[in-house]
Amino acid sequence: MSVTGPLYLRMNRWPAVGVGLHLLSLASAGTVARASLAGMTDDPTRAAEPGPPARELADIPAVEVITRAAVMLMSAAAEKLGLSEADPDESPYRDLDEARRLITALAGLVTASAEYLGPHAGPVRDGLKGLQLAFREASAAPEEPGHGPGEKYTGPVW
């Protein structure tokens, strides 16, 4: 699955969460390179998707590596929240415990790297906030503001 593939298309169905637009704007602005998760999650017997030529890790600017990591965490958290399905409550991928871990890791990354993200910091923070709010909405017993996933790094989210 490509980072700019089906998940991005499904993310357009999240108007209440507000994450999809931010990820799409990062991708269309060229900030997020088209990266494949092949070898990590795809069937190894399938042929690799044609894509841009591979780049040496040393040639990729730090802001792009950080942004890619943030998008990967956002995408994974969205899947674990069930946001890729028409009805998140019925998603076979929904796992709020896993979503909590991913959102907390994303919050730590975003907080630690905000000064390096420049103009990309705002959209990444907005995506994080959208996931935190979606988590609160999905929880049977939502925590008090300040105690949700990643809020020890970001502060309370309402």
Image (cartoon, rainbow, N blue to C red):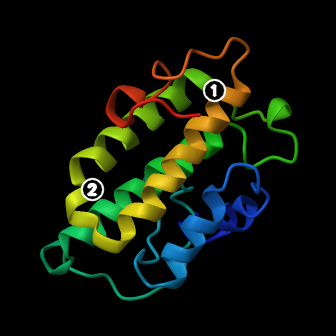
Image height check: is 60 above or below 12?
below
Q: Is residue 82 left or right of residue 89?
A: left
Q: Nearer the viewer, residue 37 or 90?
A: 90
Q: Tell me the element at label 2.
A: helix
Rendering coords of residue 124 (x, y %): 44, 58
Determine which quarter of the picture holds residue 151. top left
Q: Amino acid at mark 1?
A: Asp
What's the residue at 58%, 63% (across, down)? 1
SS at circle 1: loop
Where is mark 2, residue-wise? 114
**Image point 58% across, 42% down: which residue?**
131
Q: Would you place residue 16 above or below residue 93 in this image? A: below
Q: Residue furthest left?
A: 58
Q: Position of residue 42 (x, y in %)?
A: 54, 56
| Structural crowding at the residue carrying mark 2, measured as other residues with C-alpha within 10 Å and reported as few (<14), some (14–19) or many (≥20) | some
Mark drawn on residue 95: 1
- The numbered mark at residue 142 is none
The answer to whether residue 28 is left or right of residue 72 is: right
Left or right, 33 with reference to 127: left
Amino acid carrying label 2: it is Ala
Residue 41 shows in this picture: no
